[in-house]
Image (tube, rainbow, N blue to C red):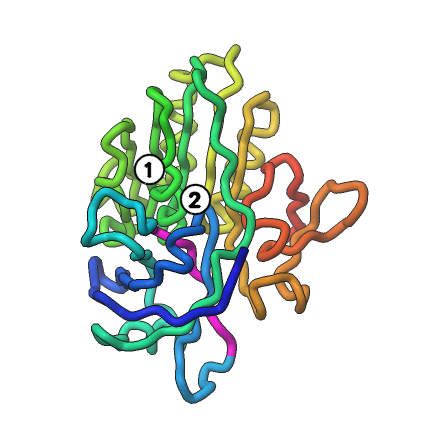
Amino acid sequence: MALQTDGIVLNNRKIKSIYFLLEIDCPAIANEAKPGQFVMISTSDNHHPLLRRPFSIYKSYSTLHPSKEKRGQLSILYKKVGKGTQKMSTFKEGQKVNLIGPLGNGFILPPLPSPAATILIGGGVGMASLSALGEALCSEKIYVFIGGKTKDDILCEDDFPKGKVFIATEDGSLGKKGTVVDLFLSEIERFDRGRPHHVYICGPEGMVKSLSKALKSKKWIIQVSLEARMGCGFGACWGCVVKTRDTEMAYRRVCKDGPVFPLSEIVWESS
């Protein structure tokens, strides 16, 4: 159940170019968070900007976690791109932050045991939710595809000790030159076509659209975590709808019904 609560900033630091890691002591949310869920954070104490900002939960440690130092903590991986995240980048240790969460429906984990592969494909801060998912996976066959424009956009590459990691950058500064979609398609033959592989995707809309088209004929179990601008975070404003093939409702709310959906349900609007 989502709740509104205050957390205390433990650390807030730049990790790469315009990417930051915010660590918060917030046991009420950390105890309940699941991979793929998010929080809405108030980035200002003077109502400017007015609306909260949505952020995927990157790491969360319950109060029962083996490490006493991490208990009750959650962390957010964010990119400084506007007024809200600019304000967040100035948060100081000990500062009080107001959050609502955990929100949304997270990833459904693959059943065990399974001879099929588990494939994670992401880019940018979309890797935050995939990293959280990676920690929860028990599969022995995990393949992780990470993409970015440059090496400074490659995040979480060290977060998957159980997986085989592939990296692509559009300028060729790290890994294979090209998009993460190109990289994945160049490796797709390694996956047994006869098995129902589990695929998890999170990243920019262009990347997700390309993967949707490329994987349309596959009989794989594919989940996508959508990125969207949100007004409230809990479905009241209908400001983050996506068109779906659901027979009961043509549009569904990314914040309330998602952000994770079966890829086959999404109807992409013509651009």
Above-or-below relation of 117 to 61: above
Q: CA distance from mark 2 to mark 1?
A: 9 Å
Residue bearing the label numbered 2: 35
Q: Nearer the viewer, residue 63 or 199?
A: 63
Q: Residue 216 in the image: x percent, y percent?
A: 60, 29
The disc labelled 2 sits on which kind of residue?
Pro
Q: Are marks 2 and 1 in contact (CB under 8 Å)?
A: yes
Q: Write the residue at 22% across / 40% down.
A: 158
Residue at disc 1, secondary structure: helix
**Residue 212 colored magenta?**
no
Above-or-below relation of 55 to 126: below
Above-or-below relation of 133 to 95: above
Report if residue 226 is visible in the image: yes
Q: Residue 128 in the image: x percent, y percent?
A: 36, 49
Above-or-below relation of 49 to 142: below
Q: Earlier in the sequence, mark 2 or mark 1?
A: 2
Which region is colored magenta? Answer: 51-60
Residue bearing the label numbered 1: 135
